[in-house]
Each structure stands twice: as structure tokens, then as C-alpha cells.
Amino acid sequence: MGAMRWAAVSSPIGELGVAIDTDGLCSVQFQGAPPGRAEEPDGLLATAAVQLTEYFEGVRTEFDLPLVVRSGTEFERRVWDRIAAIEYGETTTYGSIATELGDPGAARAVGVACNRNPLPLVIPCHRVVGAGGKLVGFGGGLPRKVHLLELEARVTIEAAFR
């Protein structure tokens, strides 16, 4: 684990802060890079910035980056692994994930894990919705969640008609 390097990435949902260390992508933040820490991206940092930009342009449906997750409880890591498997343009519910992980009563704990996700967008917690498809909870705010789900729905529909 080396020192984190940060870049600011412009997006339709606001400036994102993206960080790498010597092992891979380790943070994506909706509030941008920490003040005074953003630098001109190169190497993996530039690759991460390009892939995020491509995602928002609708030309990238999955990320190809080495990911580093050093935080989280065992349960949170299991939730993040499950979230990472949700296909582009698809959704699942907090309750479904809880059930899949063997604890049907843990829907709220799944929501907490989503909120603590260190790599939102790349580990797509925006694809997790409430029972019945209700849009609830998102660390980046519900307007961002709506934007991301609408983007993926549009790209998926357009791809079906090509």
C-alpha cells in the first residue's frame, strides 16, 4: 500500500474524486478530491478517469481496473462482492441481497454496507433498490442514483435496437 494519488473527474453528477495507490483504485468520492490533493492524472489514475468518463458517455458498461478495498467488515465485503456482480442496467433489492447472504432480516445492514462502499459506480451500489423497486437511500443522494439508473436503462435499451 503506497500513498494515495487523487484526480478530479468531471461528470454529469458532479465532480468525482478518484484515488489510486500502488495496488489499484482505492476510492471514488462524490464530493470530489480532497482540497489541494487533485493532480493531473497519469498511468492508472488516468485510466480510471477515462473509464469513468466513458461510463458517463454510455460507451463503457463495465470497468477494467485493479480494485483495492482495505476497509469494511466481513459482512460489508460480502455485500460489496454481491453488488459487483449486478449486471449493467439491472437492479436488485437490499432484501434480496440479505437473503442471498443467508440473513433475510439484514436488509438495513445491506443498506449500511452500500453507504460505506469505498468504490461507488465501480462497485455499483446504485443498482440496489428498495422493496418493489422503490428508490431509497444512496450515499451520493437520490438524484444521482436516478441519473445513474436512467443512464444505464437508456444505454441498455439503445443497445437492444442496434
Image (spheres, grey):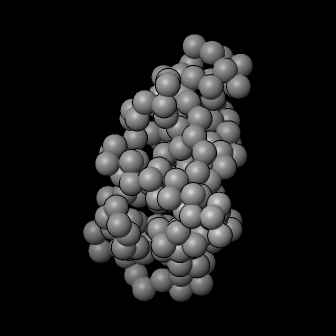
Q: Is residue 50 visible?
A: yes
The extreme left residue here reads: 35
- Of residues 113 and 62, the one nearer the viewer is 62
Quarter of the image for residue 21 reads bottom right
Judged left or right of residue 106, residue 40 is left
Residue at (49, 25) in percent of width and height: 132
Residue 34 percent location from the top left of the image: 33, 65
> How many numbered callouts?
0
21 relative to 95, above or below: below
**Residue 143 screen position, x and y as percent:** 31, 48
Q: Looking at the picture, how far across and down is residue 61, in whole percent?
A: 62, 63
- Residue 67 horizontal side relative to residue 20, left or right: right
Residue 39 occupies which quadrant of the picture? bottom left
Place residue 17 in its image quadrant: bottom left
User: 31 and 142: which one is in front?
Assistant: 142
Which residue appears at 71% of the width and 19% of the height? 102
Q: Nearer the viewer, residue 106 or 6?
A: 106
Question: Residue placed farthest to the front in the image?
Answer: 161
Q: Residue 26: tell me if it is visible.
A: no
Q: Is residue 62 above or below residue 54?
A: above
In this orientation, which residue lies closer to the viewer: 100 or 47? 100
Residue at the far top: name it: 105
Quadrant of the drawing holding the C terminus = bottom right
Which image quarter is the N terminus in? bottom right
Q: Residue at x 43, y 30 (%)?
A: 134
* Image position of 83 with respect to 38: above or below: above
Query: On screen, 123 above or below 10?
Result: above
Residue at screen point 39% across, 32% down: 136
Instruction: Measuring from the top left, give residue 57's x and y in whole percent.
Output: 48, 72
